[in-house]
Amino acid sequence: MTDSNSGSNCDSDSNFLTRTRVFYDTVAEDYAERFRDVLTVTPIDRALIDAFAELVGRGGAVADLGCGPGRVTAYLDSLGLSVFGLDLSESMLAIARRENPGLRFERGSMLELDVADGSLAGVVSWYSSIHTPVDELPRLFGEFLRVLAPGGHLLIAFQVGDEPKRHDKPFGHDVILDFLRRQPETVVELLEAAGFALVSRTVREPDASELSRQAFLIARRPG
């Protein structure tokens, strides 16, 4: 979701997964319509997904974690990857399955993946870590590393900043959620502490619909 009004409190308690699921279950249809063409109008973002796909290699097994309505999942599939999507929100998954009947979508948490150790060539976290409190990021990145084979690649996207952006009653729905901004240096440090090696760091300026810079990191599991 793009930037909105600012907020001062981060979603950092143990219920953040429940709050995130309820939020996206509520806004799913409006969200999917609002961001239907997001990859079409963001060529830099699309080029970075292309680069990630080339690093993974055609046919590589990839998980799109926090896939939402499945737009990135479908694009990865079009690039020749063997991809599946995972999300907390059953409403988001219903849209993803409806619009992409030939692809696999599963419900689950990124923090507890039902995926065998070292079984994936790639992991994508496309703006899906932005609801995870910072003290849970080491666990999250450790899980990403666990499911990647040696030499496998991670692509992670997030908004840049030091303060959260609060989305209060988006699209007129009675829900609220904080979207956490990060500094790229902080995320790189946490990825390296988890065992990743940084491959690429890209930060672009906001477009007309955004309030903050956007960061894209590609990292690799050594080996």
Image (cartoon, helix red, strand yellow):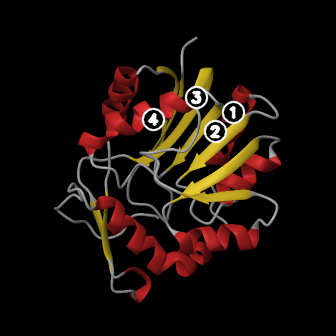
Classify mark 1: residues with Cα within 10 Å, few (<14), some (14-19) or many (20+). Answer: few
- Front-most of 71 and 139? 139
> Amino acid type of disc 1?
Ala
Residue denoted by label 4: 143
Q: Residue at x 33, y 29 (%)?
A: 190
Cα distance between the residues tagged 3 and 2: 19 Å
* Front disc: 3 or 2: 3
On the question of residue 86 being in view, the answer is: yes
Among numbered discs 3 and 2, the one appearing first in the sequence? 2
> Amino acid type of disc 4?
Glu
Residue 222 sits above or below residue 138 on the image:
above
Q: Is residue 52 left or right of residue 17?
A: right
Q: Are marks 4 and 2 in contact (CB under 8 Å)?
A: no
Residue denoted by label 2: 48
Among numbered discs 3 and 1, the one appearing first in the sequence? 1
Classify mark 2: residues with Cα within 10 Å, few (<14), some (14-19) or many (20+). Answer: some
Q: Residue at x 37, y 35 (%)?
A: 184
Label 4: state its secondary structure. Answer: helix
Classify mark 3: residues with Cα within 10 Å, few (<14), some (14-19) or many (20+). Answer: many
Label 3: state its secondary structure. Answer: strand
> Amino acid type of disc 3?
Leu
Question: Which label was assigned to residue 51?
Answer: 1
Q: Are marks 2 and 1 in contact (CB under 8 Å)?
A: yes
Cα distance between the residues tagged 4 and 2: 23 Å
Label 1: state its secondary structure. Answer: helix
Measured as percent of width and height from the top left, residue 197 is found at 48, 18
Question: Which label was assigned to residue 148?
Answer: 3
Cα distance between the residues tagged 2 and 1: 5 Å
Among numbered discs 4 and 1, the one appearing first in the sequence? 1
